[in-house]
Image (tube, rainbow, N blue to C red):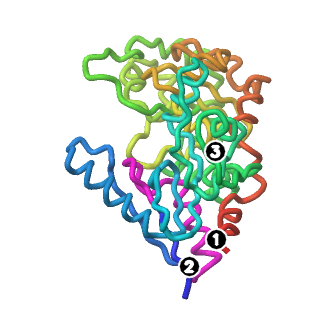
Amino acid sequence: MGKKISFVSSKNRGITLDMLVVKDFFRVNDEKVEFKDVVANENAKNSLVKKGNISIRKEYCKNNTDIICVDGSIAGKLPKNAPEGKRVLIATPYDYQFKAINEYDKGAFKKKNTYKNFTHIIVGSPFEKELLKKCYNTPKSEIIDQVCIPYSWRLNQEEFKKKHYDKYCKHYPMLKGKKILAILLTGELDEDEENPYAEVNWNKIFDNLDDDWIIFTNSGKLLENMTHIGYEHRNQFVYSNRTFDTREVLSFAECLVTNSGLYATYFAVKQKPIYCLKYTNCEFEKYMKRKFSNLYIKNVEDIDMTKFSEFTSENEKFCEYFSYDWGENPSAKISEIFE
């Protein structure tokens, strides 16, 4: 009888990219593994639905072994008679983690037990390892470091890069042979909040952008004012939001501007320039403003188009802090846990 491994996700994230990479590894390397996906939305607006999803997830985790999560989706408290097994956390850096470290630095954070019942934690970066030490109780967890998180590893594989580069070039021919500055934003502005980029002077930006560069963005807010750019710059930007998963662009981009700690972490493994753009005032933006102020940008027009492609010492510091080297396959390390 083969192993049964459950992928549990209860925070409305579904089966995430990191989970999919690990699942693909098992499918290729261990045909005897059976999978079960336990997906729920504990952030549902309907209080009864939310309560029901929490109850279902807790009951499942109490009675099942061999679980993989990307957040604190297993029960914070397990009964004494809970079955033995491997409960693995892939420590993917969502914004609540940046909130924790921001509060810790203010002296206003009490250690949480969110992760205490994981038997193994893939930290993925020195940042995550330090975060666990400061903000979370993990008394019985084996901390596995020196490997990046799974999707970061996949981004650096030449086969993956070529596949998605060719796909994007087929749909957006102007990308072929160009260097990509990816501006990828996440989160939504409040309905009554004005678009902070409605008055951006894109002609000025493109005038200072070398001809061998293209701006790729998933942000409709940035796109709104691009209708005013001159004809000579029409082929210097690409907007794509729903056609593909724009995180794939991270595999072949040369520079990233984002407000997402997750995107920045994925890209950090590539050792290329990363900047944080102010947008929704999320916790990652607050963190970058405090800790990496030289990489924090208040407005798109503040990007120095003559220097943004330089891999500065501050870029290097960020990349090394937010990702271990990509050499060893993290999925293989996770597979070893379940042997």
- Mark 1 secondary-structure assignment: loop
Q: Amino acid at mark 1?
A: Phe
As measured in the structure, the alpha-carbon distance from the residue carrying label 3 to the one carrying label 2 is 36 Å
Can residue 236 be seen in this snapshot?
Answer: no
Task: Determine which residue is flagged by label 3.
Answer: 252
Q: Position of residue 301 (x, y in %)?
A: 54, 13
The stretch in magenta equals 8-33
Earlier-in-chain disc, 3 versus 2: 2
Task: Determine which residue is flagged by label 1.
Answer: 338
Along the line of sight, which residue is nearer the eye, 91 or 58? 58
Can residue 56 be seen in this snapshot?
Answer: yes
Mark 3 is surrounded, within 10 Å at the Cα level, by few (under 14), some (14 to 19) or many (20 or more) other residues, namely many
Mark 2 is surrounded, within 10 Å at the Cα level, by few (under 14), some (14 to 19) or many (20 or more) other residues, namely some
Along the line of sight, which residue is nearer the eye, 215 or 329? 329
Task: Determine which residue is flagged by label 2.
Answer: 3
Q: Quadrant of residue 223?
A: top left
- Mark 3 secondary-structure assignment: loop
Q: Quadrant of residue 229?
A: top left
Q: Is residue 31 magenta?
A: yes
Q: In this rendering, is residue 211 above or below 329?
A: above
Q: Label for residue 43?
A: none
Is mark 2 in CB contact (under 8 Å) with mark 1? Answer: yes
As measured in the structure, the alpha-carbon distance from the residue carrying label 3 to the one carrying label 1 is 33 Å
Q: Quadrant of the N terminus?
A: bottom right
Q: In this rendering, is residue 318 above or below 5?
A: above
As measured in the structure, the alpha-carbon distance from the residue carrying label 2 to the one carrying label 1 is 8 Å
Along the line of sight, which residue is nearer the eye, 272 or 61? 61
Q: Position of residue 165 (x, y in %)?
A: 59, 50
Q: Amino acid at mark 3?
A: Phe
Mark 1 is surrounded, within 10 Å at the Cα level, by few (under 14), some (14 to 19) or many (20 or more) other residues, namely some
- Mark 2 secondary-structure assignment: loop
